[in-house]
Amino acid sequence: MAERTEPTGPIAKEGIELFTLGTPNGYKISILLEELKEAYGDKAPKVTYQTIDISKGTQKEEWFIKINPNGRIPAIIDHDRNDFAVFEGASILSYLTKHYDPENKVSFPYESDNHSVAEQWISWQHGGIGPMQGQANHFLRAAPIKIPWGIQRYVGESERLYGILDARLKDRDFVAGPGRGKFSIADISLLGWANVTIPSGIDVPGKFPNVQAWLDRSLARPGVQRGFAVPSPSKNLNHLLPQRFQEDPEAKEKFEETKKLIDDAKKQYNYNIQQIMTYSIKVNEPSLGAFPETAKDKPHHVRKGSKTTSFQNPHPSWHNYTAFQVGAKFVRGHLDGSLKVPNPKTEVVPIRKPEFLPSRFGPESGSSEQQQQLRATWLGHACHYVEFPSGLRVLFDPVLEDRCSPLTFMGPKRYTRTACLIADLPFLDAVVISHSHYDHLSLPTVREIQRRFPGAHFFVGLGLRRWFVDSGVENVTEMDWWEDVDLKVKLGEGDGSKGEGEGEGQATITATISCLPAQHMSSRYGFDQNLTLWCSWAVKSTGTSQPQQTQQRGGVTSPSPQQQPRPVTKSVYFGGDTGYRAVPQLPATADDHGEEYAHLPTNPDFRAIGELRGPFDLGLIPIGAYAPRYLMSHMHADPFDAVDIFRDTRCTRAVAIHWGTWALTTEPVTEPPGLLREALRRRGIEEEGVFDVCDIGETLRPVNKSNIVVRKIIPERRSQPADNMPIPNFKPSSGADDAQAQAQAQAQVQRPEQQQQQHEGRATGAGANTGAGVTREKTAEELEADRLYEEAMEDEYAKRDGGS
């Protein structure tokens, strides 16, 4: 071995010249070169080592950039092969074994499967262990500010990866090779990182015994020992730390401080490695559930021969506008001033900090009554986080970016902040996507979900899985309308699956996820019109209620006979993004929900959903982005349509979505809640506690909307910007009895003939609906009140619009 020297440029004339430092990536090349020397003796290439002091920036000097344009170590020059330079660890490993390991002492024949296996684990190290552990080390030791989120994120992800390696080594001596394996470049690629895990906050000896045994086995090899001494042994190598701590008590004290920092960060974000390593999700193949006879031939499929090429809306309730036509009309209207999208200057929707349950089950998830409740938290636009009593956690249409656009500097921009980040969610099992538009599907959010919750499963419409796979996400199931899948979630250890102190095995959560029709369209970049399917969804999950304990004689507590555990099933309908009927271009004073337009076709699929899949405990139903009606009604429900969808689908309760986040169309941004209240009143439904509006970040509660501006449906006036409108004051009410409301609604589930009566008598007056499913005649007093209310609204408009 030539003498190690300070770098001034290449100095050797023969053999391999290695430019390196005592780092995880540097060690892998020095170990390989020493192993080749062990294997081939004098036939191994002569080696010259040069130390590159990265703290002085030597790797950025002009002479080194000629060797590695990226300015990183390690790099080599092979002086025996025309001074050929190689950079990047994986490439150097491949190059050296190709040219200097003819007998495959530490590699495998190129054509063998073992060669491919070794390559896989080398790539896994470069794409996983290296970046994650490197960031863990940065946030722990180099970052000027200690950020708990960054610490637990990267230490946690590193632990997850070492858990994978630990499982690989369970019945093996080495990573690749037949039988129990053979020592090879697959091991060498990992050794440098595995031997500095303790300073990076990863307790390999305590948590990953198979990794530690493999590490001890590898460190017993003379070539490995010499490789770790090039250019000199690092003081942070795991196997040298005991001696270092003995000689330097301050180093040990600092290490203990770092360990506490990690423990506090993990506690703050509910991180549990055992939870991650034992958590799993299984999804069966989609199968056709109950469906109407009209869907038998799948009329929403556009076929060429027997092959589906795209999708369509099959009912007369759809306008056959293309996205380009709608876009062109908006551009033209913007230029001539006839269509103007509002631009709110302030946040017009209150934002709360979400209060998610910290535990799936047990005391931390609330009282026995609370554990039986469905909790739905609105995170803006169509995004909802739903906590089922069974322990299931579902996220619908998550988009948490500032803009819903393919461009970060252009496109609709939030006028209300996000209520939380993906990192703030305590658990996540399923992510449901309605369609491919940017306000419902976001690549950065999807990737963050994949990083934070790698076990979470995505459910999408037909054709959309390819987008996910191309984006690096493969835990995706795509489905057609009326199809169901069964979801089984095996909870991880420490996931609160049995409550504190109870543990007879791991709990399993079960659910049925159903893909259902919607009336919309799809596209990401303009030339992919309707190539993927748009959907609404239903999720149903059953859990067991936990009875509260009652005091008995002798101090013994036990549940009363009336409080024995019993199944609790909850169901959610997610409308996503949908229209209900197509409205033609009408005069400015026309009310398209009046009797004159009651003949307009509505989408019958929602009624079929209610009859075949309902009733639902909760509906998440869109109410915004509906103006001008002649352009948007076929694809976006307004509040009146939303109430009809609510009735058709037989939802007991509903929460408004698809408003309050981005100004996508021309109605004033504060208008939809007021129109919803008017629609409920005109349909004879209670204005509070049935179909509600929430603050962003608020968990489902009945709200008092008495002071929200209520406006009559006049499309042209409604399309005016309303930045000067009063900010609605959403105040929580004292609450309502959810159980009583549910029982009342279930008792009122309508028969098909009652539904038909409702659709034939849509306006106020005779036949108006009084609730979720029964009809009655309005009294003379109520009709007179309606008339006076309409006159008051006309007067309000006259004053607000200057008498125009």
Image (spheres, rainbow, N blue to C red):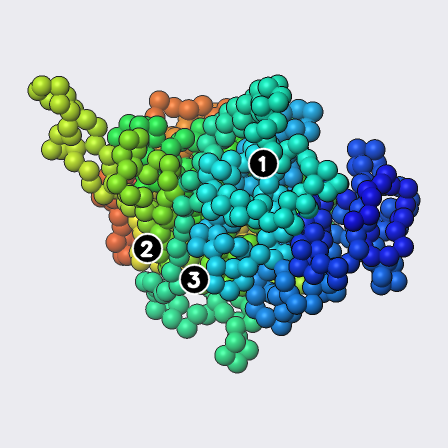
The amino acid type, in three-letter code, at marker 3 is: Trp
Residue 614 vs residue 127, the one in the foreground = 127
For marks 2 and 3, give the CA distance: 12 Å
Does the image show residue 648?
A: no
The amino acid type, in three-letter code, at marker 1 is: Asn
| Residue marked by disc 2 | 613
In this picture, residue 197 sits left or right of residue 94: left
SS of the residue at dot 1? helix
| Residue marked by disc 1 | 238
The amino acid type, in three-letter code, at marker 2 is: Arg
SS of the residue at dot 3? loop
Q: Earlier in the sequence, mark 2 or mark 1?
A: 1
Disc 2 crowd rating (10 Å Cα; few below 14, some 14-19, many 20+) is: many
Instruction: From the top left corner, tell me how far across and down residue 723 is, in percent.
Output: 64, 30
> Which picture quadrant has residue 95?
bottom right
Residues under numbered marks 2 and 1 in contact, where contact means CB atoms less than 8 Å apart: no
The structure residue drawn at horizontal position 15% and vertical position 30%, both measured from the top left corner, is 559
In this picture, residue 702 sits left or right of residue 800: left
The structure residue drawn at horizontal position 46% and vertical position 70%, both measured from the top left corner, is 299
Residue 447 vs residue 618, the one in the foreground = 447
| Residue marked by disc 3 | 481
Residue at the bottom extreme, as displayed? 305
Residue at the left extreme, as displayed? 553
Q: Earlier in the sequence, mark 2 or mark 3?
A: 3
